[in-house]
Amino acid sequence: MTIQLLVLIAVSYAVTKHPFVNDTWFIAGLLAIVINPQLLEPYYPRPGDVVANGLIVFFLAANERKTITAPGWLVFTYFVATAISLAALALVLGAGRRSGRFFGLANSARILSQIASARVLYSVVFLLSAVEFRPSLNSDFWKLITVWALILLVGKVNWQAVWATTRGHEEICRVEGMIGPCGLLVSAPNLPAPGSTVSLKAGSCTAIGVVTARIRRVSDTWGQVHVADSACCESILIAQTLAITPNRTNEQGPIGSVDAGSTDTSLKFIALRPLEIGQVVGVSMGNSLPYVLYQLSSAFIEQRDIKGGAHLVVRAIGNQLGVFDPENLYFRQHRWVPLPGGPIYGGDKLKGPSNASVPADLLLLGNVIGTDIPIFLNYSLACEGHVAILGMTKMGKSTLAARIANDLSKNRRVTILDQTGEYVGKRGFARYDKNVDMKTPGVTVFEPKVGEVAADRAFEFLNYIVKIALEEYKAGIPFPRVVIIDEAHQFIPEPAGLGFAAPGRDSSFKIGALLMQIRKYGISVFLISQRTAVVAKSALSQCENLIAFRSVDQTGLDYLEAVAGGEIRSLLPQLRQGEALVFGPAVSADGAVAIDVSKG
């Protein structure tokens, strides 16, 4: 723009001996060079721009003397009037809509009106005025025509790009605004791809940033750059111009920044590189503070609109895990929102404990998906209540139950209730009989005989060990016992799904009531089932600790979401074999966390 203005002033001085004149051709040049690209038609002629420019042309034509150019002005006036009419019709009928009664007519009028671009209108005004200014078509006339052609040619050159090229790989950007506290909105001839780490320099301020958004427009590239230092970000904004240089190092920058919609329990951001559901990301709380960790639960594609363009981006959502305490091997909730605009880092930046000592009463359930951060089940807390292991078949429920049974049997009496024969036939556990000493550590499998009602036999067995524990309770401290009920819907079916006098219905009611009492006698129950809908709710509701494998059952998802909260409904169906969501007071985390159980 500056070069064009200097050229116009130079020709004015050469022809009239004055740098500024009030002739129509000079005014048309000023409008075309200075005012119009800023206020009207910065990218392409919109209907409103055509109307505004047409009215300006009428004003210029009314104040221009007309002698030999009168026929030309008349034809041109008709042309401008037609363009204004078409543009007004497009505005009235709603051009730009995707549907509507007059959708086709409105867009046709808009396309036709675009012929009257600012370049066309002011070029005609300049030409007619130049002929009127020098009707003899002498050297002054040809100077004006040559200079106008030069001005149009100079306007087609992207001088920002030329300047950037002469400086090597550095891009000179214009700072258009700020999304506080750490986001700069810039425009430049070109910008690196989203996720690129860049060096920034504006005046005396230098910083490292990350390109978080990039949208190509007709004449430039719009972008958003995240700068961790908010004070430096404001200094760059005041400077208004910025030099951006791509960082050639292999160091991975942030994968996003904390975005609007984040809460004290969830994180929302635009992902700058491909991630996975279940992956852990961390939000920095400062150089000397630990990361607050979040686990990705869902992602979707949305459109980001700006003036002159739009781009599709990936919006990711994560549930807060908290801050990991390596000394106590525990995740503690961070009871506040993440830092607005704060950088988010991938799992490669997150390290688990190196040489932490593990208490004997902790069972390693597995590691947080994609990390080496361990999650434990505290046996003392788990056996003060009950545990539910839920999920689809072939996901790893029985394998985990067998590992828990072996570990618990070192200092507790464990009995597995099973109708399938898997634990005895495939896993090599001993079968229960009346000679088993229920007051010593060990593990056996109780299997109802063919024809027996599983619920009745389960109640009889629970009632039997409750009597033993009750005597011990009266005498002092009862011996700890654990009952693992596999395929729990067979032993404790939901009574509402059975007929009034159906076999096992009364026993299921009694077991549900029994579970509310037996924990004080040192008896803990582990329920294993594929579906929550077919297990007695009175029993399931007593399980404050949950280990949930992959599930797509809507009733089960409703139940687990009500218990664990958050975004687990979208996370559970996407878990792979050997992955589970764990939650409860016996788990080494304040909230729900998805883990890889196969690493346990």
Image (cartoon, rainbow, N blue to C red):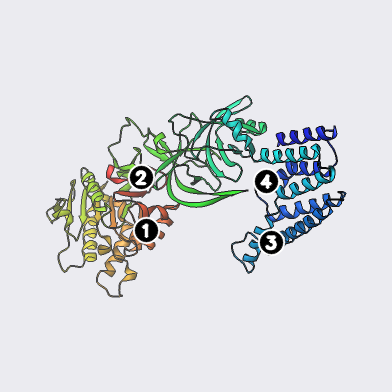
**Residue 331 location (% of width, % of height):** 41, 40
Give whichever of discs 3 and 1 has the lower sequence position: 3
The kind of residue on which mark 3 rests is: Ala
- The dot on residue 541 is 1
Amino acid beneath label 2 = Val
Q: Which residue is mark 3?
A: 90
Instruction: Tell me: residue 102, above or below residue 48.
Output: below
The mark that comes first in sequence, 2 or 3, is 3
Q: CA distance from mark 4 to mark 1?
A: 64 Å
Distance, label 4 to label 3, CA atoms, is 19 Å
User: Real-space Cα distance between discs 2 and 1?
Assistant: 17 Å
Q: Which residue is mark 4?
A: 42
Q: Position of residue 260 (x, y in %)?
A: 56, 46
In front: mark 2 or mark 1? 2
Query: In which quarter of the view is residue 445 placed?
Result: bottom left
User: How would you rate the neighbour count of disc 1 (Cα within 10 Å): few for under 14, some for 14-19, many for 20 or more?
Assistant: some
For the residues labelled 4 and 2, the Cα–Cα distance comes to: 59 Å
